[in-house]
Amino acid sequence: MILLEIVQLGELQNFCRALDRIAGAGLPTGEAAAQAAEAMAPLLQVDAWLPEPWAASSPERYQQHLLYCDPQGRFSVVSFVWGPGQRTPIHDHGGLWGVVGVLRGAETSTRYAREADGSLATGECTTLVAGMIDILDPASGDIHAVDNALPDAVSVSIHAYGGDIGTIERSSFDPDGTAHRFVSRYSAQGPLLEALH
């Protein structure tokens, strides 16, 4: 198990190095997200690499555990851990691109689009299972809500964003489109990777 974690943490480091290259390329958000999604795929091939503290759920709410944050704040990688029945509010990503890959379990993403009057119309609802990746591009609309698709088990997904998602101010929304500013913050668990070697 320890050897597997070391090998797969190497895969996490490779992913973060790819994100470093993407962040330095100055790409449009959609292209950056597409390249990040391609780079994420190998990370989802084995689900046992994530150490337990970064896969821990909470009975109160979903957890956002920091795996790595670029020292310049250009990108961050986190594990989201969903207990049974847990979900996010409707929210955006503060102008950041993002990719979401399911490591274990399943999650449902419901997209929303703004109407002319400012309200939100419910759009496509997609269930992602282990190994599947979703792209969030603010240029084409990234407002969504996410919930654990499993009623009786924990689900875990790996997220990467084009900035420090745990510190930026972004919005949650009521169905009528009313926005509420918030900062999602990370769990008390420190980063899994302190630096890229």
Image (spheres, grey):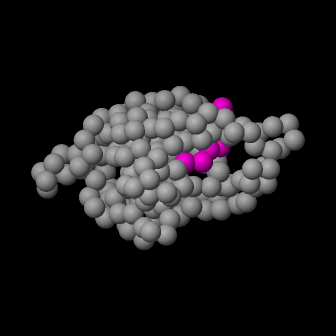
What residue is at 65 percent from the left and 62 percent from the top? 182
Most foreground residue, 109 or 74: 109
Q: Residue furthest right?
A: 117
Q: Locate residue 148, reporting x and y percent.
A: 47, 51
In-image side of 148 versus 105 (left or right) = right
On the question of residue 80 being in view, the answer is no
What residue is at 13 percent from the left and 53 percent from the top? 1
Magenta span includes 141: yes
In this view, 53 is above or below 74: below
Magenta span includes 123: no
Q: Which residues are magenta?
A: 140-146
What residue is at 35 percent from the left and 36 percent from the top? 131
Q: Locate residue 20, reporting x and y percent.
A: 41, 42
Q: Quadrant of residue 136?
A: top right
In-image side of 84 versus 56 (left or right) = right
Instruction: Count all numbered tags in the image, as a single digit.
Output: 0
In this view, 126 is above or below 10: above
Q: Quadrant of residue 137?
A: top right
What residue is at 31 percent from the left and 51 percent from the top? 196
